[in-house]
Every structure is written in structure tokens, then in C-alpha cells.
Amino acid sequence: MANTTSTTAGGGDFTSNLGRIYGIYTGGFIAFIILMAILSAMGVENVVIGYLFMGFTIVIYAVIGILSRTMHVGEYYVAGRRVPALYNGMATGADWMSAASFIGMAGSLYLLGYDGLGFVLGWTGGYVLVAILVAPYLRKFGAYTVPDFLSARYGGNLARFIGVIVLFSCSFTYVVAQIFGTGLISARFLGIDFNVAVYVGLAGILVCSMLGGMRAVTWTQVAQYIVLIIAYLIPVIWMSTVKTGVPIPQLMQGQALANITALETAQGITVHHITPFVHGGYDAKNYFLLILCLMVGTASLPHVLMRYFTTPSVREARVSVAWSLLFIFILYFTAPAYAAFAKWTMLDLVASGLTPENIAEKAGWMMRWAAADNTLVQICGKAATDTAAIVAACAEKGVTALSFADINLNADMIVLATPEMAGMPYVISGLVAAGGLAAALSTADGLLLAIANALSHDIYYRMIDQNAPTSRRLIVSRILLVMVAVLAAYVASTKPSDILSMVSWAFSLAAGGLFPALVLGVWWKRANSAGAVAGMIAGFGITIFYLVMTQYGADLDKATPNMELWWGVKNISSATFGLPVGFAVMIIVSLLTRAPSRDMQDFIEEIRVPRGKQMMEEKTA
Amino acid sequence: MATPDRVSYWNKTKGLMFTMLGLWVFFGYVIHMFVEQLNTIVIFGFPLGFYMAAQGSLIAFVVMLFWFARRQNAIDEEHGVHED
């Protein structure tokens, strides 16, 4: 495998051979899966297969990271701006699809039915906003970081500094969720304690992003995309083939839905999977507000926007957004099918006559998950660690035959547990674990890099020491990367919330804090510095206030009563309030203060056309 | 800098942006407001309202973006502001 990536360090040679290199890599990965299947059939223990899958893939990422190491500023921050549109799309796909998409989403769709589709819509439609409102213009400007643009457009370091604060808040929240995801996977598949496992995941993240910056992260993310998409598709194709005889799960989902509804009716379940606006408190209002916050957040998240700084031209940046969404779409339109087949399998299991005494025999996987963490599987309201515990819990409740509602599965374990649920060989479980790990690592890499770049480039270089030599800037960046990563791992070990909520908060924070300033910066010449600063503070302030007050309350203690929701809006859609306030304050303050200078107006004119040299030139000596 | 050609370029770019924004509102929100009515139509086991949120709108977004990239590029070339 090593020779497939050995040309990574070379420049032009490597980019012209991308198709061949990643083709060999994909073939190698499939051969590896087959080898694992053979080993498993020969009787190698499950936990060994788990270690091999995760160990092998992490080694590959590390090799790419080491081969792509760089001390060149342009390579470190924007991969030399040489990444072709299609590969940038693939890298963005991995950057984008995190533990939330891979691990959390299908699980939430399983639990929430139609109402979970808000996540599917919200996390795809936002790319329309990225393409038409923001990305091509930032590419023309030629920024290294999103705060770079804010500073140039809104004249000065105050806008830059507030931009960095917003960037840090949303990216940090997001990265905590990823490390939480890697911890969950390591705890179950490697059998290590969750609190230790989060730090193990961290090591894998750091080797990729630390040495080679954006260049290493880009080529690692392409490799990670390939692993995660294969790992996501195989189990669901398998289930579709077993259940319906047709290996196209996206199409056969229709049959699955019809069966789910029939089984639900037979088992007396009144809240159907396909019924809209009835699950988990998602009424129509919360459903649509969630979609809005996720879409707008997409167009504001710095770690996504900065991927479009790496394309060779504005034109490529636009096409690249389309490629990104295509690669993301492949997973997202499979997720509802994943959930439907998993739910069908579970309803079938319940219909087979499940009792507290026979569940351990019929579905032993539940006990293994309950043993990894006692919140993951609960039967009759208690952790389902063994038959005795289940029988005791159910006797207390007077349950003799288990119904679907008696079995409570955690959203974050459903995808990872599906291979066992559907009786697939363990090698598929190992593959899914490697895929989930790839998704979490690739996003964490992008996020940590966004944070470290903002701190080293925007704070240290631009605001503290303008004369800092290149080498020192890059070393500062790497040290900050490690510090932020360790802090994030610590926060993750405290288990703040489930993965999907944490990630959704990050979207709201980015949307409330950055979207008005980014969009009006390009599309409204009258927007000025005072307006942007006031708008960012107001939008971000309201969003984070609502989030913290409703989640933790003024005393920052989750256990005590927190602030009532405003009009019943869930706090994963906090930007519902931050977004309009941010826009309104920015517009009003801009109109009350002086219009931007002639020079600034010319600057905006220049950003709006692709032709001409990029606006921000960097000394790279 | 604001030559007549630049003004016309920007007007066309804005027009395309608003067209895309309109389609985005339609596929992102409007169609899903009619989910209950659409669910009465069932194709291949899929209630149509469910299908639109699970797959239909997503396909629309992907197609829209490739179309947008082509269209905007054509506008650039028409006005001679494309990159060399």
C-alpha cells in the first residue's frame, strides 16, 4: 500500500496521476477487506479484526500525512491552490461528513422517521447557498482564512477578531462531537474505556493535520472519503439484498417503508415512521427552522468554506461545490434507506416473539453494546447487560412479551450495530467501525486546522507579530493545534450531549455569527465596518445566549432547571433568533454610519468578477 | 470600475442568483409544506411526500448546482470576465 501514496510529496506529478493513485488505493482497500473476511473465517478473534481495521486505516492516513508534510506557507494554508475541482469535492465530502452524518444521522432517522429527514435536507441544501452567495467570491479574494476576508472587507482587526471568536466557538463545539464519536467507536470495537478512548482517537487526528497542514489534510480526506463511502454502502446493500433480493437499497426503501407501516400497524404502534411532524417534539415549525439553521450554517462554517480556497480558479471553485454535493449526496440519500432497513429488521425481530428470557439468545449484540456503555441499550428502562438484568427490569414493570417500545436503542449506536443486528459477519462490523472513524477523523482534521490557522495566521501573525518568519508561524500553528485538540478531547470525555445535537449547535453558532457579514460583504456595498461588527456581536450573542441558557441555564448546571424555550423553538435551531437579529443590526447600523470608502467599493467590484489577479497576495518567504 | 458592461454582468449574475435562491426555497421548504397531501400518492411503496424529503429534493439540489456552474461560466465568458 505504501507505494500508492509515495508520490504525494511531489507536486505536478502527483496531481496529474490522481486517478491512478486513488484507483490503486481503492483496489488495495477492497483487497484488504477480503483479506479480513478470510482471516475472520479462519477463526481470528473479533477484537483482533477490529484492531486491524482501525490500525491499518490510521497507518495509511498517517503515511499520507507524513509524505505531504510541508514548511511552505501556501501549501500549509491552502494546499498550493492546486486541488482539482473533483478531488476537492471528494475532500470536502469527507471534511463535511462527520461522525454526525455517518454514525448519528441514520440512527436519528431510525428514531425520528420522517422528522429526521430535516437533517438530510438541511445538510445538503446549504451547498446551494455556498455556491451562489459565498464560495466563489472568497476564492477570488484569495484569503487564507475566513477572518482574513472579514478583516479586508470591514477594514481592520476588530472584525477579524470577532470572526476568530465565532470560528473558534463553532469549530470547537463541532470537533468535540467528532472526538466523542471516535471515543464511542474505540470503546466498542477496541474494548477500551471511553475516557481513554477519546485520547486514542486524538492521536490519529493529529498525525494527519499537524505535519502537512491543508495539503496533507486534503489528500488524507480524499482517502478517507473512499473508506467511509464503501463502509457506509456495503451493510445497507447487504440488508437490501437479504430482505428484498435487489441490491439497490435507495430504490427498495419504498418496499421497506411499506413493510414498516404494516408491521407497525400489526404491533399496535400508532406513531408511524412515515408520519410527519409527530416524533421527538419536531412539529412543523421546529422541522423547518432546523432545516433553515443547518442550511445557513453550511454556508458559514469556516472549515467548509476554506476548502474552496484550495482550487486553482474561481470557476473550479464553483464546479467543486457541485462535486462536493454529489459526493455528499451519495451518503445522504442512502441514510434514510439505512434507517428503514434497520427498523424493518428490528420490527421483524420483535414480531418473532421476543421475551425477556429469549432476547439474549436472539439478539446477543444488544448485551455487548450495553456492556460497552450502559446508556446505549435499555430494555424495560434499565441497561440490558445480561438476561438476569433484563428479566429483573421487565418483571418490575410487569412486561412478559417485549414490544418495540420496550427496547430503547441510542441513536449513536444504530449504524455501528446494524451489521450485528442484521446478522452480518463480523468483518462488516469492523469495516463500519473503520468508516465511522474515517468520517470523524477527516472532519476533525479540517476543524482543527481551521482553528489552528485562525489562531496562528489571524491572531499571531496578523495581529501580534507581522514580522514573524514563516517557520515560526508554522510552528506556532502546530503547537496550537495540539493544545486545542487535547482540550477538545477533555471536553468530549465529559459527554456533553449526543453527537447530532453538538454538531447542530455548531451550525447555529456559525450561522448566527458569520452569515450576515459574509453575504452582505459581497452582495451589499453599503455594508460597512461598524455594521458588520455590531451585526456579528448581536447575531452571535443572541445565538449563544439562547443555546447556553436553554441547555445549561445561568448557573451552567445541566441538572437544575434551565431557561424556558422561546415559542417552543428547540435549541439546536438557536440561529432562528441570531440570524434575523444579526441581519437587522448589521443593516441598521450600516445605514446609520458612513458608507464605505471609494476604495472599498472598488474592492467589492473586483471580488465580484472572476478575472484579474486574486486580491490578497501573501509573502511566502 | 462600474462600466456599463460590468453593470450588465452583475445584473445577470444577480438574476441567476435569485433564480437559484427561488428554486432553493421551493425544494428546501415549499414542497415539504405539502407533505401530508403528497403522502397520499404512493409510488414503489414510497409515499411521495416522504420521498421528496429523503431523495427528491436532494437530487434537485445536485442538478441545480451543476447547472449553476455552467450557467455562471457562460455569463462570465459572454462578458469577457472569465479567468484565462
Image (cartoon, coloured by chain):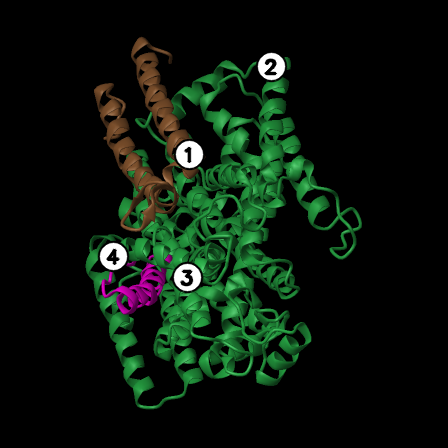
Chain colours: A green, B brown
Give SS at disc 4.
Answer: helix
Question: Disc 1 designates what residue?
Answer: B34
Q: First in sequence, mark 3 or 2: give its number.
A: 3
Question: Disc 4 designates what residue?
Answer: A14
Mark 1 vs mark 4, CA separation in Å: 50 Å
- Name which residue type carries label 4: Phe
Question: Closer to us: mark 2 or mark 1?
Answer: 1
Question: Disc 3 designates what residue?
Answer: A263
Chain letter belonging to callout 2: A
User: Within the image, what quadrant is residue A490 found in?
Assistant: bottom right
Q: First in sequence, mark 2 or 4: give its number.
A: 4
Q: Is residue A151 left or right of residue A558?
A: left
Residue range in magenta is A221-249
- Name which residue type carries label 3: Leu
Question: Closer to us: mark 3 or mark 4?
Answer: 3
Q: First in sequence, mark 3 or 4: give its number.
A: 4
Residue depicted at x 28% and y 58%: A10
Image: A225 above or below A306? below
- Name which residue type carries label 2: Leu
User: Within the image, what quadrant is residue A584 found in?
Assistant: top right
Q: Residue furthest bottom?
A: A43
Mark 3 vs mark 1, CA separation in Å: 26 Å
Give residue A556's position: percent from left, percent from top.
Answer: 76, 52
Question: Disc 2 designates what residue?
Answer: A591
Image: A387 above or below A581? below
Chain letter belonging to callout 3: A
